[in-house]
Image: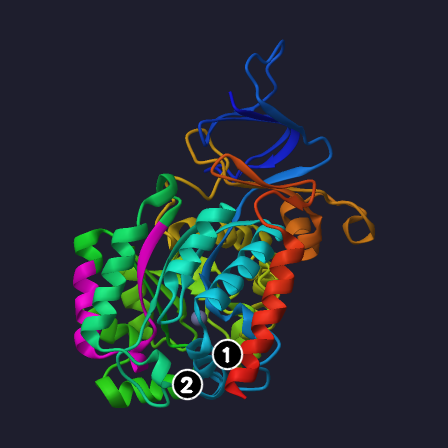
Amino acid sequence: MDFVISNATVVTMNAEREVLREAEIVISDRRIVKVGPPTRGGKNGVRQSIDARGRVVVPGFIHGHLHACQTLCRNRADGLELLDWLRERIWPFEAAHDAESMRASADLTFLELIKSGATGLLDMGSVRHYDQVFESARDCGIRITGGKAMMDHGQGLPAGLRESTEASIAESLGLLERWHGQEGDRLRYAFAPRFVLSCTEGLMRQVGELAKKHGVRIHTHASENPTECDVVREKTGMDNVAYFDSLGMLGPHTTLAHCVWLTANEHRLIRESRTCVCHCPASNLKLASGYAKIPEMLAEKMSLSLGSDGAPCNNNLDMFVEMRLAALIHKPRSGPTAVTALQVLEMATLGGARAIGMEQEVGSIEVGKRADLSLIDLVGAHATPKGEDLVSQLVFAGRSSDVTDVMIDGRLVMKNRELTTLNEGQVLAAAERHASRLAELIS
Ligand SMILES: [Zn+2]
């Protein structure tokens, strides 16, 4: 026994969606070996313990779509729609990155994620410097599946982001070779062709083949904005998802961010192929993209996760913010019972685990799974009175400041609100310094 969490209220997210009271969680060698009533008598060999009386333990949140490379551009890209936002702000900014600023951006991202109870993410990088994102994840202990953005085509691309098809594939394979499966499988590679408008057909086709050959995920964007969908149709003669289907890219190993403007045919293709969708409500609202048909997707049991997308289109990286929005924004169209708190928490945990292809390993608090979990202290005015439904309280009224402890792969990365693997003051100072430098470079 390495670790015991005692006297906890545990939101297990197991098949029965049980909430256990006064329960004990025992962790050994990175995995959960017991969840249930406390064992009487001595606990021989326990190296560490937490008395979680009064606190709630939840599976760590997993963002299904994020760009750690964009976090230093937070608060510098408001008031634009997707294609202008990319061309005027995001691409010049990403192109200006060097290795040091990328590391600062990743450190800041993971700091914010951990402090808000997230234990994992599916990430899309910029074209260059993805080693720095993996190095940051390796050092801070977060679980990441991610890859460099692939961009061998498109208008308005700064020179720093343009790459040949061959170079894009070669660099992706190099990163896969160096990082996939490292740190006891905590770091995983995913091919990340940016979106249809940034990639040639040849690149997309090779990604479809290589992902299957290497058994890794595909992570891309689809049908986020009506203008994007029109230009994709002009370019390919097909809608986004039908195009991916024609190139052999769909399946449970693929996660598509957004899926706001799906046709009925695309909706069917996603459902039948069990392709994962990541809902990003804040991003879809801020870029004026629209509302994904989440109630319809839930009714058809499609595989859904939740993500904050990049900091410049949110501007938070906080799963509590996304959960609250996901639970609220569909009600005016679909009624007050559409998208329940439990469905939202499923998206943030079990759905995130599917988005990274690790549903057998993480996403719930069950014996045999990796110990990725967060402790939450629901006290104060916003959490009083408690009411009957703990999941509802977490989703509608929970805040990231309620998170006290975070464990990833059996290791405490935040304890009593103190980070154990990141120096918060240094991370914030470096982020501010590099953000100003990059802003000056592109001004
Ligand atoms: Zn995105």
Toward the viewer: 203 or 329?
Answer: 203
Q: Picture quarter containing residue 247?
A: bottom left
Residue found at x 77% / y 49%: 383
Spot occupied by residue 99 in the image (x, y as percentages of width and height): 43, 66
Q: Can you see residue 251?
A: no
Spot occupied by residue 307 in the image (x, y as percentages of width and height): 50, 62
Q: Secondary structure at mark 2?
A: helix
Q: Picture quarter containing residue 212?
A: bottom left
Per the image, is 360 magenta? no
Spot occupied by residue 86 in the image (x, y as percentages of width and height): 45, 83
Whether residue 302 sits left or right of residue 107 in the image: it is left
Per the image, is 199 magenta? yes
Residue found at x 38% / y 51%: 354
Q: Callout 1: few (<14), some (14-19), or many (20+) C-alpha neighbours within 10 Å?
A: some
Q: Which residues are magenta?
A: 188-210
Tell me the residue that label 1 is attached to: 290
Residue found at x 50% / y 79%: 290
Quarter of the figure with the C terminus: bottom right
Q: Amino acid at mark 2?
A: Pro
Numbered label tally: 2
Spot occupied by residue 242 in the image (x, y as percentages of width and height): 25, 74
Q: Amino acid at mark 1?
A: Gly
The colour style of the image is rainbow
Extreme residue toward the right, this view? 381
Sequence-first disc among 1 and 2 = 2
Toward the viewer: 428 or 71?
Answer: 428
Quadrant of ligand 1: it is: bottom left
Q: Callout 2: few (<14), some (14-19), or many (20+) C-alpha neighbours within 10 Å?
A: some
Relative to 206, say whether 232 is above or below.
below
Residue found at x 53% / y 80%: 287
Tell me the residue that label 2 is attached to: 226
